Amino acid sequence: MGILEKIAEIEKEISRTQKNKATEYHLGLLKAKLAKYRAQLLEPSKSAGAKGEGFDVMKSGDARVALIGFPSVGKSTFLSLMTSTESEAASYEFTTLTCIPGVIQYKGANIQLLDLPGIIEGAAQGKGRGRQVIAVARTADVVIMMLDATKGDVQRALLEKELESVGIRLNRLKPNIYFKQKKGGGLSYNSTVPLTHCSEKLVQLILHEYKIFNAEVLFREDSTPDEFIDVIVGNRVYMPCLYVYNKVDQISMEEVDRLARRPHSVVVSCGMKLNLDYLLEQLWEYLALICIYTKKRGERPDFTDAIIMRRGASVEHVCHRIHRTLTSQFKYALVWGTSTKYSPQRVGVTHVMEHEDVIQVVKK
């Protein structure tokens, strides 16, 4: 019995089992087994086949965005509109067969946009180059999920299921669970909040499934067994995702309004170039990028060349970006902008910068 058959068997068993108090341990064990088999499935096979054409693209620019979606939803058209790169677009499926990179220039930042081949159902098992597509998506900072507005809900559910099964968690935070394996001493289990989904027995059963008998577990939030399994496995990627509904010119206004009000969703039409500027604004928010301008002593700030940083970056990060030796010679910095109480404010290396701040570094 192959791994795929085992996975299918367990999924059937989970769907057959009623969810109640009596079956929660059984379901917890099945979920742990399922996660284990899926991890085995993702491991590359030992026997190396013939070398094919490379798929991944070198990371460049300030951030990386992956375009994921079913074939023929308008990913290549979107890439051609947003960037100066031409990606072949046609009215048949699988026009794009490899990963095509482009660069969006927005607010002084270079955002690398990757047009990936269409994903089909069963991609997580390797159908239609699905594994490579998903592997590239794991390296991105944000995922844009392109959906056809005429059949968006079905496509969205299928894509989420495919990404979920390979350990990509969309628009979710990492579970607040402390987990550490030990050499001995059995299982030490604690929680700082009342737990409604997990119990000590269930935690023990799940750990035994992974052959872990000595560990320290502390729940700091009410997590589900699935989230606990994610913490044990430890190779999960938590990333923001924007659901982009394309081809809204083919549906009614009421339907457009319904889709636009859903969380993390944007409605666009690549064919008629509708709402693309709002999509870029949203993408900037999801990437959490900020622009910081530098200023020389006695001169006006240089607004032509911004330093692009992540939100929450401190003065120390900015100094590293300018030159790696600058922090050792740093005396203080003068900052103008929204992060200060008054302008200019004299700050140290720990001061957190905000969007469009101006900084002048004074050396020793």
Image (cartoon, grey):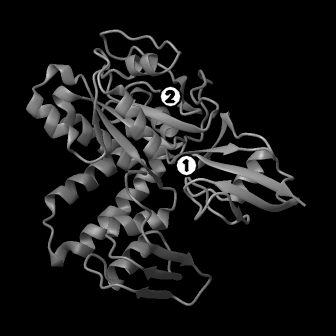
Q: Position of residue 349 (x, y in %)?
A: 73, 64
Please give the name of the residue rendered at 44% of the width and 45% of the height, measured from the top-left corner.
285
Q: Position of residue 69 (x, y in %)?
A: 34, 30
Residue 358 appearing in the image: yes
Reply above or below: 272 against 198.
above
Element on which disc 1 rests? loop
Residue position for label 1: 355
Task: Give the quadrant of residue 314.
Answer: bottom right
Task: Give the quadrant of residue 257.
Answer: top left
Q: Position of residue 65 (x, y in %)?
A: 49, 36
Reply above or below: 11 against 162.
below
Which sits in the foreground, 30 or 311? 311
Reply above or below: 202 against 118.
below
The amino acid type found where label 2 is placed reads Leu
**Within-10-Å neighbours for mark 2: few <14, some 14–19, many 20+:** many
Which sits in the foreground, 45 or 175? 175
In the image: residue 10, left or right of residue 362: left
Q: Earlier in the sequence, mark 2 or mark 1?
A: 2
Mark carried by residue 114: 2
Residue 2 appearing in the image: no
Reply above or below: 86 against 110.
above
Label 2 and label 1: CA atoms lie apart by 26 Å
The amino acid type found where label 1 is placed reads His
Please give the name of the residue rendered at 24% of the width and 22% of the height, measured from the top-left corner.
247
**Within-10-Å neighbours for mark 1: few <14, some 14–19, many 20+:** some
